Structures are given as structure tokens and as C-alpha cells.
Image (cartoon, rainbow, N blue to C red):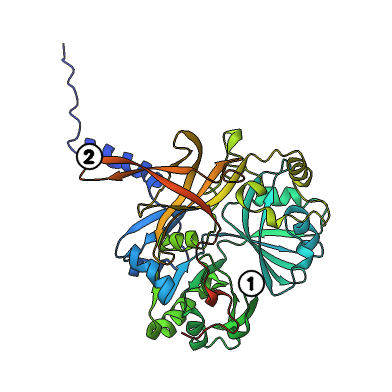
Amino acid sequence: MAQATKKKPLAAAPDLIAAARIAAQSHFRTLRLGTPFQPRLDALAKTQDWYNWAGYRAPHSLWDEELEYFAIRSQAALFDISPMTKYRIEGPDAEAFLDRVTLRDVTRLRPGRVHYTAWCDDEGFVLDDGTLFRLSPTRFRLCSQERHLPWLLDSALGFEVTVEEETEAVAGLALQGPTSFAVLRDAGFAGVDKLKVFDLAEFEHDGATVTISRTGFTGDLGYELFVAADKALSLWDRLMTSGEPRGIRAIGYTALNRARLEAGLIVANADFTTAEHAIRADRLRMPDEIGLGFMIDLEKGHFNGRRAILEARTKRRLLHVLVGLEIEGNIPAEHAIVYYRKSQEVGLVSAAMWSPMAKRNIAIASLARPYGDTLVEDLWVEIYAMRELQYQKLMKRAKVVARPFIKLDRRTSNPPADF
């Protein structure tokens, strides 16, 4: 009787199986999307410190996060904002549609102007905040942190309007800092000196046009530029060439985040949780609870969340308040718990830093009312600081202060300063 023989597996099989498994899982670890500026970013990325911004490979830093921050405040800093979600909204009813879904009165937004706004669900909870650019009487661009295309399309029923996402088609750059105007002027953008804060205009570039607005997320003199994706690299090179004598530097998000904190600006899903992302009901926030109540215009027609917002105001149902804090000492209170009289937990810090410009230890925190609203004394934060390889608990006094933490005259000066 013949004896069955066992087939010996190939020696390389285990290696092949392991390689196959790694290949199958690699898409979970690899950020697949590159922005139109990716070749320039990759060439400058000395730190190789990347993060996932809406599926794009974006830099936390490129060369040195501390010096990148000072580039914003002392020269000119270039930051890739292409991953920011962008929608083109146009048609005869574009103004009426946007007035219906956003908080601010869009009829007051003239062509060639930008305003900061937000939008809510029917219960009055914030879905997101962003900037609305009025490019013409019937054409707008809405920029935001999160994606909202299905919601916008559903909301557009009954309006003669077209809503299209153009995130991939339109590249964006933020040029921020005291020499940003001089960089644009030296790059040949004649007439850019006429732009006041929140103005926008179109300029010629590489056989096409670039939209330049006097906006930004740093509280400094600065601009944002939007161009067709196929003209992105030529725009980058144009700015870097003209900006070289004035110290232009490309930066990552860490530096930008520090500047926005000094400016007292908030970030969706960092300082507040958007309504679509909130799992727990107590994480939802109305505009008045995150410092956006100034946007609400009750004199205009009906808008999403109007009834709920008005009811919360009249019946005093607003449960939270977002505040600026100044904290004793110089140790940042990142994600620290806020206490009343050192014992009662009343809130949480969402962003914190020692500010080189303000020379203060600053933070943004969400507190449960009435703390931070009518009760502003005897507040403390709990900080854990590393001291000789051991964490030490520190209770530091905090006081509620106004935002922005710094105010730079050059941001709003007209004409812009020539540094």
C-alpha cells in the first residue's frame, strides 16, 4: 500500500503571506490624497511630521514648529489650506438659499466681500462654522471644516440653485504675517493694496485668475488665495520667489494653531463638537454656547434652528459658555479640567499655550453655566507637569478674560503696512 506523502510548503510562503497582509492593510495607514501643492511640501518636509486632514496628507510641521510660529508673527508664512472643504453655490436663488441655511444675513454680504458664519440643524445645534465668499451677485464659495454636501443638497430643494463640491478642483493657500502684503505686491498682484479686511478680488495668474481675499486664521495681516488646481505650483513658486527677500517660509498646522489661539479663534471638533459628530447629547452646542451668538440675526427671515435658538434664549436653556482664560504660571493647561473653588468640576480646557506675543498663559475652555458667565471668580485649572521624570499635580488660578488674547493693528490697517 502506497504511503501518502505530505507536501512541504515553500520556504518563502510565510514571508509572502505576511507581505500580503501588510499590503491589504496598508490603505488604513497610508494617507492617499495629496494636495496640488504636495510636491513642494514634500521637498521642504524635514520633520516628516504628517497628519490626516480630511484624507489629505498635511504637515504638523515642516522644519521647526517653534520657528514656524515666529515666521507668522515676524515675516510671512505660507500654509496649504487646500484640504478645507469648498462648495460652489450659484444660481438665481443662491442668496436666498444661503440666507435660509446660515445664521448671518446674506443679503448684507456684497459681491467682493467675505463673512464668517455658521449653520445649525433644526434643533439649533451648530453643524459647522466657516467662511462665505460672495464672488458675484449669484455665485458664492462656502468653506468649512467638515463635509456637508448631502445636507446642502437636501436643503436646496425648492431653490433654483446649484451646489457642487470643488475641494479637489480649487487649491488654496494662506499667506499670513507682517510682510504678506509686500510679498503679494512684489509678486506683481497690482491693486492688492486696495483690499480691506474681508474684501476679495480676482487677479491674473499664469494665463488664468487667482482669487485673493484679505482673510486668515491668525489674527495677523494676511491673505487667502484660491486658484485652479493645475495652476497651484506656479502660484506657489511665484510667491516663494517674491517672498524670499522678506523671509517667506512654509509652515505646518501646529504653528497656525498657536496663532489662531492667540487670536481667540475656535476650531470645529476641537473647541466644540459639531452636531453630526456628537455621540452624547450633552456635547451638542448652540451658537450662544460657543461664542457665535453675535452671528444670529433674528430680524431676517426664517433660518435653520431659529425657533430653537430663540426658545433657548427666552427660557434660559443655554447650559454652556466658551471663555478665554488667563492662567497663572507658564505651564500650558492643555486639556485641563477647570474647577470652582478647587473642588467642583465645571468645565474643560480645549486649547492652551504660553503666548510669546501676549506674554501670558492663555486657554480656551468650555464651562457649565453660570460658571464663566456670572460666576467668574475662584476658578482653578488642574495641570499635570513633568518634574524630574514624575508628573506633579498643580492647581493654578484662572480668570476669565476677553478674546482675542492679542490684537494687532496691522491686521486691519488700511492701506496695509509695508514691512
First in sequence: mark 1 vs mark 2: 2
Nearest to the observer: residue 379 or residue 284: 379
The residue positioned 38% from the left and 52% from the top of the image is 332
According to the image, label 1 marks what residue?
A: 198
Compared with residue 203, is residue 55 higher up or lower down, i.e. above or below? above
Callout 2 crowding tier (Cα within 10 Å): few <14, some 14–19, many ≥20: few
Compared with residue 341, is residue 297 higher up or lower down, i.e. above or below? below
Q: Quadrant of the N terminus?
A: top left
Q: Which mark is residue 15?
A: 2
Compared with residue 28, is residue 172 higher up or lower down, i.e. above or below? below
Residue 95 occupies quadrant: bottom right
On the image, the x and y values in percent for residue 194 come to 63, 84
Three-letter residue code for mark 2 = Asp
The residue positioned 39% from the left and 66% from the top of the image is 69
Rounded to the nearest angstrom, the CA distance separating label 1 from label 2 is: 58 Å
Residue furthest to the top in view is 1
Three-letter residue code for mark 1 = Phe
**Element under label 1?**
loop
